[in-house]
């Protein structure tokens, strides 16, 4: 047909149609591959014992699809002759090169992330040292940043950028950047000091600057803790080097002081019964409490007879759940023994003046 033989930008309409058909064919191929992955490959990986292959398929699904599209685009632009328009050819080839390199970079980054998540992290969580627990997220982020930095540099180099000149320019501007980012640099060095000093580890409960919570992540610039009311607080790492940190988890046992007040009509025998009940409560809850405790008739208060009850919660027991259990047990057993707790009262005596 004469229409198909017409030349546009150095190629016949037929050649342009075939090139577009290649791109559309690669798009159709992506749909087929996507269906195969979703309905065949994923079902096969679910039957294996390891979870690594499931994670790899899940993370590599999109890069694989993108790779097929880029491959179709690459074949299409090389099928047609663009030698008469060198600038257009350079632009199209450069875009394809950058897309290929960034896709490969994404694949490498995702594979690395999957290996860390499924192999390295479970192993690290079993260790007791703690330092590797919070250094792993930092190493993970730094490695991924390096992978992407190399990918971007290689991509820019392939489209004609002078990488040497660019790096030199970055070196000159680095000083100004460092001066402008003093706080960030300070926080990064503080993160290194946290690793060296080891004031806490992941999942430790700490107290600092009015915040009380459990450490969830130590990053390059900041540390995230989940407070006791469930909120995430992001604290700059420099805060830990400039202030005192209380590591609640590291204490051998949590000391709890409980002051109980019984009414003034309590007899000496009943008071001793109350002391004995508290000692028995400690003995009956040895799974969460240390055996050592201090219980005694403390003082004669304004409106009550005071009993001091000191007990210690074991490090592996939850601090609030344990207190809740013991306090309810005290209330239950004192009520069963007929021991009445006092509340603030005043007795007024009216004396008739003659």
Image (cartoon, grey):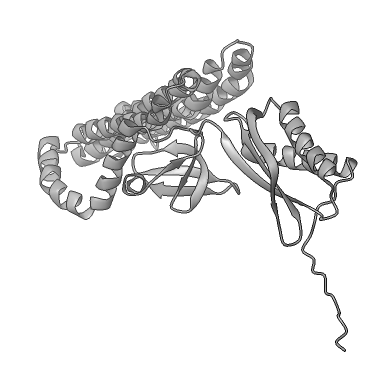
Give how far across and how far down residue 44 sits, in percent: 61, 13
Q: Nearer the viewer, residue 21 or 213?
A: 213
User: How many numbered marks have been drawn onto this rendered protein structure?
Assistant: 0
Name the residue: 14% across, 41% down.
166
Note whether 16 is above or below 266 in the view shown: above
Image coordinates of residue 289 in percent, x first then y, are 66, 30
Q: Quadrant of the C terminus?
A: bottom right
Side (left or right) of 185 relative to 55: left
**Residue for point 43% across, 52% down:** 209
Give 73 or 165, whichever is nearer the viewer: 165
Q: Is residue 342 above or below residue 216?
A: below
Q: Nearer the viewer, residue 103 or 149?
A: 149
Note whether residue 222 is visible: yes
| Residue 129, quarter of the rendered image | top left
Q: Is residue 173 left or right of residue 146?
A: left
Q: Is residue 82 visible?
A: no
Judged from this view, the residue extending furthest toward the front is 354
Left or right of 300? Residue 122 is left
Question: Residue 243 at x, y = what percent?
Answer: 35, 49
Residue 217 percent across, percent down from the top left? 45, 37
């Amino acid at each position: 047909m004469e229409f198909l033989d017409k030349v546009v930008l150095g190629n016949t309409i037929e050649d342009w149609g075939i090139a577009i058909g290649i791109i559309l064919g690669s798009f159709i191929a992506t749909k087929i591959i996507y269906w195969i992955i979703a309905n065949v490959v994923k079902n096969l990986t679910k039957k294996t014992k390891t979870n690594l292959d499931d994670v790899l398929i899940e993370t590599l699904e999109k890069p694989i699809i993108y790779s097929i599209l880029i491959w179709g685009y690459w074949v299409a632009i090389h099928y047609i002759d663009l030698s008469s328009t060198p600038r257009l050819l350079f632009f199209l080839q450069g875009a394809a090169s950058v897309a290929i390199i960034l896709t490969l970079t994404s694949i490498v980054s995702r594979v690395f992330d999957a290996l860390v998540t499924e192999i390295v992290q479970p192993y690290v969580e079993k260790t007791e040292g703690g330092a590797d627990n919070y250094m792993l997220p930092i190493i993970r982020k730094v490695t991924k940043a390096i992978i992407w930095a190399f990918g971007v540099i290689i991509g820019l180099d392939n489209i004609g950028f002078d990488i040497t000149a660019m790096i030199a320019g970055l070196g000159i501007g680095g000083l100004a950047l460092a001066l402008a980012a003093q706080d960030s640099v300070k926080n990064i060095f503080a993160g290194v000091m946290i690793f060296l000093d080891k004031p806490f580890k992941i999942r430790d409960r700490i107290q600092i600057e009015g915040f009380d919570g459990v450490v969830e992540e130590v990053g390059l610039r900041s540390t995230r803790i989940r407070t006791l009311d469930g909120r995430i607080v992001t604290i700059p790492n420099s805060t830990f080097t400039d202030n005192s940190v209380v590591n609640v988890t590291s204490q051998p046992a949590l000391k709890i002081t409980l002051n109980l007040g019984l009414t003034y009509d309590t007899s000496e025998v009943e008071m001793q019964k109350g002391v004995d009940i508290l000692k028995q409560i400690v003995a009956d809850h040895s799974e969460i409490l240390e055996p050592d405790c201090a219980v005694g008739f403390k003082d004669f208060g304004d409106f009550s007879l005071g009993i001091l009850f000191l007990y210690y919660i074991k490090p592996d027991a939850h601090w609030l759940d344990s207190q809740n259990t013991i306090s309810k047990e005290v209330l239950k057993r004192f009520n069963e023994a007929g021991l009445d707790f006092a509340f603030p009262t005043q007795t007024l005596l009216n004396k008739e003046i003659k």
